[in-house]
Amino acid sequence: MKYYGKSSLSSFLKNVLDIMIVFGVGLFAVISKRTLFSTVESVTPTLAFVYGLFIVGSFSLIFIVYHLRNIIKTLVHPADPFVRSNVKSLRRIWFLCFVISGCYFINFFINASYKSFKLIYLDTMGIHTDLEFFVFFFAGLFIVVLEKVFQAAVEYKEDNDLTI
């Protein structure tokens, strides 16, 4: 199996991420339309604030997928992941992960979810958890480390390219 270049796993992932961006924007539009038009009469400051958190979190998630797509794209066309643009994309991704984590954290207290916090629970709808904050927080920490590794790799690669 080819992992990078044309007709590879990377090419397939790039196409999946393209679809996810379109699907994410469409889903955002549908949810926004339902939220805005179904609650016009009963808009409260809390609902407006939570909707603002939803907007920030949604755009952050869409941009994360966009930056992941840009990283994967470097594996398809030049097949070289150790470039400065990937380091910048990773930096933006970890920042956006922390933004989403912050949105979940704020929403946790605004909606008083902390009163009924459950680590993990099962009901007729499936398995649920109240740990979304931690998922994005630790993903952000992991990506900070990856960004530093990529940054070092880019510096080593540039040094080697300059060596004759």
Image (tube, helix red, strand yellow):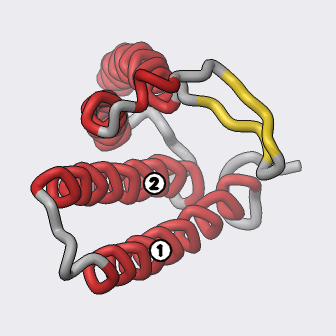
Q: Quadrant of residue 85?
A: top left
Q: Kindly identify the residue that appears in the image at 30 percent across and 55 percent down.
A: 54
For disc 1, the marked residue is 27
Marked residue nearer the N-terminal end (1 or 2): 1
**x and y, in percent, of residue 130 in the image:** 55, 29
Q: Nearer the viewer, residue 155 or 102?
A: 102
Residue found at x 42% / y 31%:
113
Q: Is residue 24 above or below residue 151?
A: below
Q: Which is nearer the eye, 64 or 130?
A: 130
**Which one is nearer the viewer's eye here, 116 or 94?**
116
Q: Position of residue 62 (x, y in %)?
A: 38, 59
Q: Residue at x 32, y 24 (%)?
A: 158
Residue beneath disc 2: 65
Q: Secondary structure at mark 1?
A: helix
Answer left or right for 88 relative to 74.
left
Q: Quadrant of the C terminus?
A: top left
Disc 1 residue type (three-letter): Leu
Residue 49: horizontal and vertical position, in percent?
Answer: 16, 52
User: Which class describes the residues within 10 Å of circle 2: few (<14), some (14-19), or many (20+)?
Assistant: some
Q: The disc labelled 2 sits on which kind of residue?
A: Val
Q: CA distance from mark 1 to mark 2?
A: 14 Å
Q: Is there CB contact under 8 Å for labels 1 and 2? A: no
